[in-house]
Image: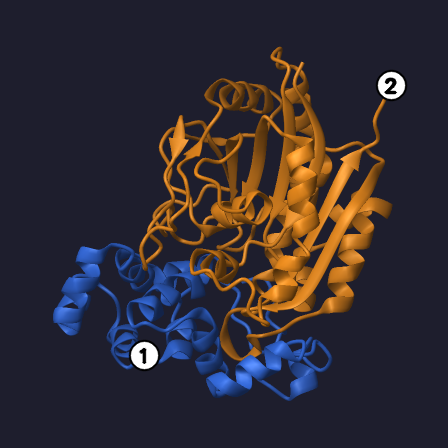
Chain colours: A orange, B blue
Amino acid sequence: MARITAGVGVSHVPAIGVAMDTGITDQPYWQPVFAGFERSRDWIKKAKPDVVFLVYNDHCTAFSAEMIPTFALGCAAEFAPADEGWGPRPVPMVKGHQKLASHIAQSVILDEFDLTIMNAMEVDHGLTVPLSIMFGQPDEWPCLVIPLCVNVVQYPPPTGNRCYNLGRAIRRAVESYDEDLNVVIFGTGGMSHQLQYKRAGLINSVWDTDFLDRLTSDPVGLSQKPHVDYLREAGSEGIELVMWHVMRGALDDEVVEVHRHYHVPASNTAVGHIILENKVKE
Amino acid sequence: MAQKDYEDIPGTFVFDADRSRQGYHLNMFCISLRLADNRAAFKADESGYLDRYPMSAAQKQSLLERDWNEMLRLGGNIYYTSKLAACDGVNFQELAAKMTGMSSESYRAMMVGGGRSIEGNRYKSEKGQG
């Protein structure tokens, strides 16, 4: 059967993608950002996922103000990197796993999570930057990708509790799929940052560190955090972190933290990254 | 209307349904700039292009004047207004600096120094902001 073996939490700052695309990752500003990803790239080479289930948000790219689905699951055969206003990123086409995606859709909808199904969707930096961080710059992405796009742009996003429970439902869906597949789930976005108005530039490292700690020590309690805490303590765009709860909910209750990286800043944002593995059962 | 528990956060507009409704046409204009042809048409005749969108005179004025905070006050969302900034060749960090009233250099230095502190920035009452 298919199984989810590990989770990756990672920021998806667009400037990280630009730094890779323009070849400036060894500049002093960027070097400490990318140094923390070297171990992650070694780890994922060894982990060899067949499929990455990637939880991210669209930044008013594929979805305009006309249509704002709370959860949209990518069921297409492929997803083209979008032009966000300065040309598409020069990264490979993202290939989906249509059969697993539609199996997950059917399973979680019958599990009472009313997803929107996307049979055509372009993907922005929210999805492609985490792939670049974890896989570098290959000619083709080394695995298939199932995107789950979460609304965190128009308030309110889904609650942390809802995201956590959706993660659990996704796990049940994956485990009821017959093909033998290794699935790694990514929760992306954050950490603390505010991009707008007079409080732009807000960073709260103490809060971020507590969030990273509790992914292992108290994930259920962490998922109960009210939205206003994210907005106030981690900045108006820090609320992207609700997406990490989908990742955490899809893992075992007890996990092992195998890697962590935290750095301020990348552009306006605190970069946070964690790799969590399920304990191996014999 | 019920009290919003996020209205007492200083220096912040939370893009909720009220703001989304108010800023709908402004935001739809901004997202149109995702496409190169539209960027070219806008640059050729900004005012004429904006007239395609039934927004308020004040919203139109804020766009023409690149008054980034006024756009947000009138229902714009940062992910939309940043597309106008991109069209102007202004990156996200430069845009953030403009909204805070800092120079790009001092804003960048603030970020490299660890960012804007949360201390004193949780509640409007701490800042004496209305």
Q: Residue at x 66, y 38 (%)?
A: A44
In the picture of the structure, the residue carrying the numbered disc 1 is B66
**In this view of the protein, which residue sits in the foreground, A128 or A135?**
A135
Q: Outermost residue, top direction?
A: A178
- In the picture, the disc for residue A282 is 2
Residue A102 pos. (x, y %)? 49, 20
Q: How many marks?
A: 2
Dot 1: chain letter: B
Rendered view: A136 above or below A193: above
Give the left or right position of residue B13, taking residue B47 as reference: right
Query: What's the amino acid at mark 2?
Result: Glu
Give the left or right position of residue B18, taking residue B86 as reference: right
Rendered view: B76 above or below A174: below
Q: Secondary structure at mark 2?
A: loop
Residue A159 in sight here: no
Dot 2: chain letter: A
Q: CA distance from mark 1 to mark 2?
A: 61 Å
- Which mark lies nearer to you, 1 or 2? 2
- In the picture, the disc for residue A115 is none
Check disc 1: other Cα within 10 Å, few if <14, some if 14-19, many if 20+: some
Q: Quadrant of the C terminus of chain A?
A: top right
**In this view of the protein, which residue sits in the foreground, B114 or A211?**
B114
Give the left or right position of residue A245, taking residue A69 as reference: right
- Tell me if label 1 and label 2 are in contact, CB under 8 Å: no
Q: Quadrant of the N terminus of chain A?
A: top right
Query: What's the amino acid at mark 1?
Result: Arg
Residue A40 in sight here: yes
Residue A187 pos. (x, y %)? 63, 44
